[in-house]
Image: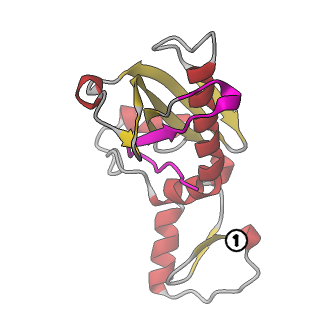
């Protein structure tokens, strides 16, 4: 099973599904962008553009928190894309969609795919031609604070676990303290 990564465009292949009425395979570009935390964190960064973490790269704690919802986010995106393909009432372009899940919200919109003309007709699935969808889906992921900022993180040299799920006592050294401090900022 595949999973969508943060801040990476992916081509989502929807194979033919007779029960849904799709007789040919489709491919749709999707991307899930990290917002860098909660609404308050994004507002703070916007107001303070010199903030050291104002880049496009997600913070380590956001990546760790995404791990807990990645499978659910992937399924939600896939289901919305399939619904949009087979529905007699598809989602209009640029209309904002919000999907709320357990610990996250996805804010998404369907947009024109700028390279559609270059890839249309160029993709295949085995010997079969794939129908390229002329729009893409862009989602912004907003994680609920309890999934990351207020979670106590225990670390060892190779593993990061949530402390409320860990039974193991870990002795801290200076390096572990530094890593934990980075994760709880």
Residue 123 vertical position relative to residue 182 in the rendered view, above or below? above
Residue 35 image position (x, y, % from top left) = 46, 39
Is residue 105 at least partly visible in the picture? no
Q: Residues within 10 Å of mark 1 (few under 14, many from 20)?
A: some
- 9 relative position to 155: left or right: left
Is residue 7 highlighted in magenta? yes
Residue 165 image position (x, y, % from top left) = 75, 70
- 87 relative position to 25: left or right: right
- The residue positioned 58% from the left and 58% from the top of the image is 67
Residue 87 vertical position relative to residue 101 in the rendered view, above or below? above
Q: How many marks?
A: 1
Report the magenta stretch's main SS.
loop
Residue at label 1?
A: 163
- The residue positioned 25% from the left and 23% from the top of the image is 117
Mark 1, secondary structure of its residue: helix
Assign the N terminus to one quadrant of the image: bottom right
Residue 13 image position (x, y, % from top left) = 48, 40
Is residue 160 at least partly visible in the picture? yes
Residue at the extreme front: 127
Residue 41 image position (x, y, % from top left) = 49, 40
Residue 115 vs residue 42, the one in the foreground: 115
- The residue positioned 63% from the left and 16% from the top of the image is 87
Residues in magenta, as a range? 1-23
Q: How is the image coloured?
A: secondary structure
Residue 98 vs residue 3, the one in the foreground: 3
- The residue positioned 63% from the left and 11% from the top of the image is 88
């Amino acid at each position: 099973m595949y999973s969508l990564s943060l801040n990476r465009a992916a081509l989502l292949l929807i194979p033919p599904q007779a029960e849904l009425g799709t007789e040919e395979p489709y491919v749709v570009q999707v991307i899930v962008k990290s917002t860098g935390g909660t609404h308050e964190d994004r507002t703070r960064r916007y107001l303070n553009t010199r903030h050291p973490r104002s880049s496009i790269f997600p913070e380590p704690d956001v990546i760790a928190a995404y791990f807990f919802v990645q499978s659910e986010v992937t399924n939600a995106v896939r289901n919305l894309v399939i619904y949009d393909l087979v529905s007699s009432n598809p989602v209009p372009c640029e209309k904002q969609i919000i999907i709320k899940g357990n610990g996250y919200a996805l804010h998404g919109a369907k947009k024109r795919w700028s390279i559609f003309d270059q890839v249309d007709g160029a993709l295949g699935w085995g010997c079969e031609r794939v129908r390229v969808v002329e729009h893409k889906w862009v989602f912004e992921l907003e994680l609920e604070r309890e999934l990351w900022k207020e979670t106590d993180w225990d670390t060892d040299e190779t593993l990061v676990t949530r402390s409320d799920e860990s039974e193991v006592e870990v002795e801290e050294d200076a390096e572990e303290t530094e890593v934990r401090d980075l994760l709880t900022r």
